Amino acid sequence: MATIAILGTLDTKGAEHAFVAEQIRARGHQTLLVDVGTGAPPSVPVDFTREQVTEAAGVDLPALLARKDRGECVAAMCHAAPIFLAQLAAKGAIDAVISLGGGGGTAIATAAMRALPLGFPKLMVSTLAAGNTAAYLGTKDIVMMPSIADVAGLNRLSCLLFSRAAGAICGMVEAEIHRAGTRPLVVASMFGNTTACVTEAKRILEEAGYEVLIFAATGAGGRSMEALIESGLVAGVLDLTTTEWADEIAGGVLTAGSTRMDAAGTAKVPAVIAPGCLDMVNFGERDSVPAKYEGRNFYIHNPQVTLMRTNPEECALLGRIIAEKVNRYRAPVAVMIPRKAISVISATGQPFHDPVADEALFDAIRKHAQVRVEEFDEEINSPVFAKACAEKLLDLMKHQ
């Protein structure tokens, strides 16, 4: 029997959440109703009041409510609910969480869910589930289910969907978890243009007894990898595709933000870094490229993706950023440079071959890095370079 938190704005959506609680209890599980409403008193009995939720974060609820600013109230609950829910989870008081909501309820509940670890069952039934949910999911495994109609009463449609949602969260806690093994975990970053390198390095690391989890360097992938490194579950980082930084400085669509590459330093995890695919900035269709970049070197990867070659000035900045990031690492780290090509399309004869830009990148790394930098007269996808990177990481982890 599990205990499932049912978190929601129980002033306006109390009956709906109470219905879900009833369905969950009918399957033999316990429930805890957590009120995060900021309007009228809750319309159903609750297990944890809004006052208890806000107290966990030091929020003065009476003063907040007195100002009658709904936006401020939602923002305060988005701050308090994650703290409160994380405390319940840390104490082992809950095994899963489910919520139903519109805009405000979804913002509050998913903020709380993002404070919970990967693998912890989280289900959000939302009016916003059919749109862009990236801001609500963050880097966590939140399941979002469309409510179809608004969460506004119990009717033939809502009862059907809420019952399915209750069954889904029960199924998550009832599921038998298959453990893949206990091998130490290495994370790696990869793009299509570095696939051969990362695949070969992965093979070598797995033969040495490690499990390798690969993240696509697509912005969300980089953020997810950083979150996993921060979790403390990772033994080593093979960050060979740091391309998201090119998007960050040039306004591309696949940026992972300014904290990309910080987690390995914070978590003190051994890392091998390479400037993989720093030759390219990602945009959408050709017409979506900002006008200020007219005249630059473009490569149409497909109708939806336009790549722009980074120029020497951008490459010099990228090299300095990479160096400054790794300089702050407090675990063994090495930067590996493949001088002949940093992607498939930057090799000799390829569309993004630009020795001047590459040298600006490499020279900036050499100039600013205070850690070990190793250079190879190889392309990034060379088996020789892949082997060197894998063996370097194995050595760094051995001496951690």
Image (tube, helix red, strand yellow):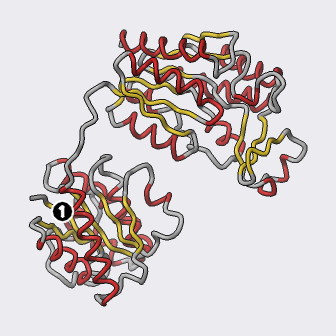
Position of residue 206 measured from the top left corner of the image (x, y, whole percent): 40, 22
Which image quadrant for residue 197? top right
Q: Quadrant of the C terminus?
A: top left
Q: Residue furthest right?
A: 295
- Residue at (75% x, 55% y) in the render: 285
- Residue at (65% x, 21% y) in the render: 380
Which image quadrant for residue 46? bottom left
SS class of the residue under badge 1? strand
Position of residue 160 measured from the top left corner of the image (x, y, whole percent): 30, 81
The residue that mark 1 highlights is 4
Residues 91 and 168: in front is 168
Q: Quadrant of the N terminus?
A: bottom left
Q: Is residue 296 left or right of residue 215?
A: right
Q: Residues within 10 Å of mark 1 (few under 14, many from 20)?
A: many
- Residue at (42% x, 19% y) in the render: 205
- Residue at (52% x, 68% y) in the render: 131
Q: Is residue 391 above or below residue 347?
A: above
Counting every numbered tag in the picture gives 1
Position of residue 71 measured from the top left corner of the image (x, y, whole percent): 44, 73
Residues 382 and 15: in front is 382
Residues 315 and 2: in front is 2
Position of residue 21 measured from the top left corner of the image (x, y, whole percent): 18, 74
Amino acid type, residue under disc 1 in the picture: Ile
Q: Is residue 187 left or right of residue 58?
A: right
Q: Is residue 383 left or right of residue 203?
A: right
Which image quadrant for residue 248? top right
Q: Is residue 28 left or right of residue 393?
A: left
